[in-house]
Image (cartoon, helix red, strand yellow):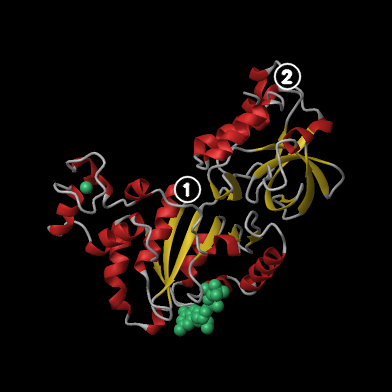
Amino acid sequence: MAKKEKIRTDFRKGHQSRTRNADLTRDYNRDELVEDDVLKNERVSGKGDLTRKRTVVGDHAGRESAGFDVTPDVSSEMIAGRVLSVHGLLSHVQIPSGEIIRCATRRVLKNLSTDQRHVVAAGDIVYYRPNGTSEGLIERIEPRANTLSRTSKGRQHVIVANVDQVLIVASAAEPSLKPNLIDRMIVEAERTGIRPVVCINKVDLVEPSDLQPIAGVYGQLGYDVLLLSAKENWGISRLRKLVAGKQTVVAGQSGVGKSSILNAIENGLALRVGRVSEENQKGRHTTTTAKLIPLAAGGYVVDTPGIRSFELWDIIPAEVIGYYRDLRPYVCLCRYPDCTHLHETDCAVKDAVADGRLDVRRYESYCYLFEGDAV
Ligand SMILES: Nc1nc2c(ncn2[C@@H]2O[C@H](COP(=O)(O)OP(=O)(O)OP(=O)(O)O)[C@@H](O)[C@H]2O)c(=O)[nH]1
Ligand SMILES: [Zn+2]
């Protein structure tokens, strides 16, 4: 199958996995030199690490084992950066000094992009060849650790790549706490391999001890749980540390205090994010692109209308249980291999709920999600 065709097919399948994303990028790169070994040695960690600011990629075809001995060819020096946003075929790439470089994309990569689907996505780590001081040409895209995507018309659109964590923002009151919605967003996070951080805001409106049971459930599952009050500045310094140096998506229903939390982390941050969201709403790339907003302490936040609700795919019911860390261990003990855990006899999940080994509310939220009910 022709390479282009193969990639299209992969997109049509609609699912993405780390492997597939890596393969995809590898496909792009196959035409690009045999520089992998050199770059692999240069990379400090696999995911988005820009500790090494510059990478010299020599003209060393046929000399793969040469590693760092390759004589650097100054004219072919490439620089690593992170894509903040994509506008058609133009990307804004931030380099570690903080400068933003306007980059076009090399033809071989460009050929793989279509009007709806860009080869380069916000959050990508790319290597570009400088053209003057503020422009460049993207020559390669690093394999993505993960992606947030939306599928439309059978095609997968990457909204943002290499996300470290998602802040799942809920509020203790006004609007009332909706644990099922938190569960749903956790499922999305688990599915994409992005670390969920449960943030319960507006703690000032309730008796904090009332939140202990719900915080306890998530804590026991190994998730970070932060009880916050953007109004009173409670828990904000911990959150500030948590987002520093990371690429963080902020999700949660309207009115829970996402903007207030962003402002508490960094003055004016919500304003900058808001401006971007407005632009996105006007533009035609609304649902297919995101922008990274740099944080003063390092790291980025991503907050676009398209991912605020964090409901990016249609969930396949049979997949849901695999993302419930607590329910999952019982599945293999059910009598029927295709047990839905809703009504079957000899269901180990239901038994565990009945004798108190599993949290009833978590089981009920699983049932809602399985049946596709609104939460
Ligand atoms: N009491 C209390 N009110 C808060 C807190 N955080 C935010 N609010 C209020 O809740 C309302 C909504 O806050 P926003 O920050 O706009 O919420 P949002 O999640 O960004 O909302 P959308 O922009 O609609 O998605 C505002 O009136 C805030 O003043 C808090 O910690 N305590
Ligand atoms: Zn079962």
- Return the residue at label 1: 192
Q: Amino acid at mark 1?
A: Thr
Q: Is residue 1 shown above or below 353?
A: above
Looking at mark 1, is its residue's CB closer than 8 Å to ligand 1? no
Instruction: Name the residue: 58% across, 45% down.
Output: 156
- Sequence-wise, the earlier of marks 1 and 2 is 2
Q: Is residue 45 visible in this depiction of the protein?
A: no
Instruction: Decide which of 280, 99 is in the foreground and name it.
Output: 280
Of the 4 image quadrants, the one containing the C terminus is: bottom left
What is the number of the mark on residue 130? none
Q: Residues within 10 Å of mark 2 (few under 14, many from 20)?
A: few
Say which amino acid is labelled 2.
Ala
Residue 343 in percent (x, y) is at 20, 53
Q: What is the secondary structure assignment of the residue under circle 1?
A: helix
Q: Position of residue 59 (x, y in %)?
A: 77, 23
Mark in front: 1 vs 2? 1
Residue nearer the viewer, 81 or 256: 256
User: Can you tell which quarter of the image residue 205 is in?
Assistant: bottom left
Q: Is residue 328 above or below residue 67?
A: below
Residue drawn at 40 percent across, 65 percent down: 374
Mark 2 residue element: loop
Residue, disc 2: 61
